[in-house]
Amino acid sequence: MERPKRTMVKAIIWNLNGLLVMSLVGYAMTGSAGIGGVMAVVNTAIGLSLYVLYERVWSRISWGRVNA
């Protein structure tokens, strides 16, 4: 099983990457760095919350695991 701290670190790194990509996409779509940034922050906040929940649920499911 994975510890909650590891899940959180993975989620933060993943979402920092997403924040950068969404900022660039938002800027490209709107032509505004401010609007693109707001879109990215909202998306990251929602995505981070859902990702942590998703990982914690899957950490409790034993299906597909191999005991080493």
Image (tube, helix red, strand yellow):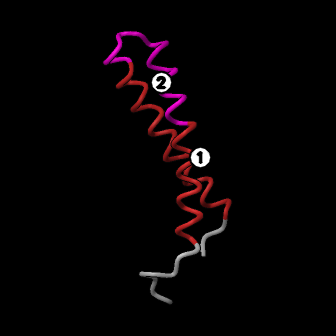
The disc placed on residue 39 is 2
Residue carrying label 1: 49
Q: Amino acid at mark 2?
A: Met
Give the residue displayed 45% in from the left and 81% down from the top: 63
Give the residue displayed 54% in from the left and 29% down from the top: 42
CA gap between label 1 and label 2 equals 16 Å
Residue 30 drawn in magenta = yes
Q: Quadrant of residue 8?
A: bottom right
14 lies above or below 2? above
Look at the numbered disc 1 and give the secondary structure of its residue.
helix
Give the residue displayed 51% in from the left and 81% down from the top: 62
Q: Tag 1: Cα neighbours inside 10 Å, few (<14), some, or many (≥20)?
A: some
Instruction: Determine whether, in the image, residue 53 is placed left or right of residue 14.
Output: right
Is 51 or 17 nearer to us in this picture? 51
Give the residue displayed 31% in from the left and 18% down from the top: 29
Which residue is farthest top? 32
In magenta, the rendered stretch is 27-44
Q: Main secondary structure of the magenta part?
A: helix
Is 55 or 21 nearer to us in this picture? 55
Q: Amino acid at mark 1?
A: Ser
User: Residue 31 location in percent, x, y?
Assistant: 35, 10
Instruction: Determine whether, in the image, residue 53 is placed left or right of residue 43.
Output: right
Residue 49 drawn in magenta = no
N-terminal of the pair, mark 1 or mark 2, is 2
User: Residue 57 location in percent, x, y?
Assistant: 57, 66
30 lies above or below 25? above
The disc placed on residue 19 is none
